[in-house]
Amino acid sequence: MQRRRAVGLLSLLPLTGAFGLVGCKREQPYLQFEGATMGTRYHVRFRPPVSSFDATAMQAVVDARLEALNASLSTYRPDSLITAFNEAPVGQVMPIDADFEHMLALSRQVHQASSGAFDPTVGALVKLWGFGWPKPEQPLVRLPEAAAIEAARVRFDAIAQSAPGQLVKHAPVQLDFSAIAKGYGVDLIAEVVRAHGVQHFMTEIGGEVATQGNGPTGGPWRIGIEAPDPVVTGRVLTRVHLSNGALATSGNYRNFFEVEGRRFSHIIDPVSGYPVPQPPVSVSVIAPNVALADAWATAFMVLDEDRGLAVAEKNQLAVYWVYQDNGGHRTRQSSRMQPYLDAAKH
Ligand code: ADP
Ligand code: MG
């Protein structure tokens, strides 16, 4: 199984449109830094508010915040709060922190609005299908038995907050916030960067993006949505123009696994318990924050084409789908997406 990100970042492309607010005041040149997190890397590119700006100090705050998030929500860590919750017996009250509570609340919101297409209680199914953590000792060679799939079923209703900071399960369910936590991590980086007085920045973790203000060429940031290609990275299909925004993409064209000669998506349909048989190649979503965009992008991988469009319109989301089509690809978008793409054509 390969895991690669599905969005290329092309924020440095020159702009010809006159969106800039560049006055006669001398602007600081843009700076950038990056680091490792959540099995991938984060990037921050920003215009410092003053020439004496201490980017190293800001990066230390970013790293500490991401570390706290991972200590709570990483299913890859044996000592995280989420691992403790997943390993706890039914009925045992477990401690959770504010990040954990926030992820539960946002997840419930998207779960309800997507009629269950997004469900963070997919943890046991993710492990059963062999793409969880720890990685199975051997890759999955046979499809799981129907009884095992049934036993690993989602049950978001079996999780309850008995009191603030406390969580209990009434059935042996396991949580997995992989489809929302990266986006939330980007929201947290953006919060730190804003708190340091920075007004123009773009930050991302593995292709989930937050922007504010202008890019280095003076107009809104330009984010490339990558063309589907299992081998070549970085070919751009279209560009999204984003000033103050949150964009996330869920992609399937490099992230899949094979069992018994069949190709499976790493996105699970919570209703069937099986990987989604023919998901879109990728779905990109613009939402009020990156956590929501991330969760919704995953939900739209589960929903079929017509349901997906209806749900996007009902929830007033800007969504861009890429589908496989006779060896090539075709795209579809919700009505709210158009302005971001139109602007990008300038
Ligand atoms: P990526 O990890 O490639 O950025 P996503 O944000 O779509 O992609 O997250 C996919 C991960 O989310 C899976 O690897 C799995 O751990 C988990 N997951 C799979 N299906 C669902 C689902 N229907 N709802 C919530 N989480 C899911
Ligand atoms: Mg997601």
Image (cartoon, rainbow, N blue to C red):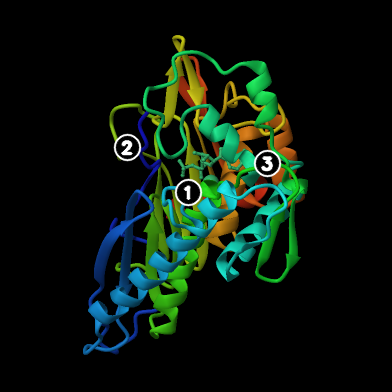
**Toward the viewer: 158 or 51?**
158
Horizontal side, residue 282 vs residue 160: left or right? left
3D distance between C-alphas at marks 3 and 1? 16 Å
Ligand 1: does it lie within 8 Å of the C-beta at label 1? Answer: yes
**Mark 1 secondary-structure assignment:** loop
Q: Position of residue 135 (x, y in %)?
A: 40, 34
**Toward the viewer: 261 or 305?**
261
Q: Position of residue 48 (x, y in %)?
A: 29, 81
Residue position marked by numbered label 2 in the rendering: 235
Circles 3 and 1 in contact, beta carbons < 8 Å: no
**Mark 3 secondary-structure assignment:** loop
Crowding at dot 3, Cα within 10 Å, few <14 / some 14-19 / many 20+, comes out as: some
In front: mark 2 or mark 1? 1
Q: Which mark is residue 172?
A: 3
Horizontal side, residue 12 vs residue 21: left or right? left
Residue type indicated by callout 3: Pro
Residue position marked by numbered label 1 in the rendering: 75
Sequence-wise, which precedes: disc 2 or disc 1? 1
**Mark 2 secondary-structure assignment:** loop
3D distance between C-alphas at marks 2 and 3? 44 Å
Report the quarter where the N terminus lies. top left
Residue type indicated by callout 2: Arg
Crowding at dot 2, Cα within 10 Å, few <14 / some 14-19 / many 20+, comes out as: some
Residue shown at 27% from the left, 81% from the top:
57
Residue type indicated by callout 1: Thr
In front: mark 3 or mark 1? 3
Crowding at dot 1, Cα within 10 Å, few <14 / some 14-19 / many 20+, comes out as: many
Report the quarter where the C terminus lies. bottom left
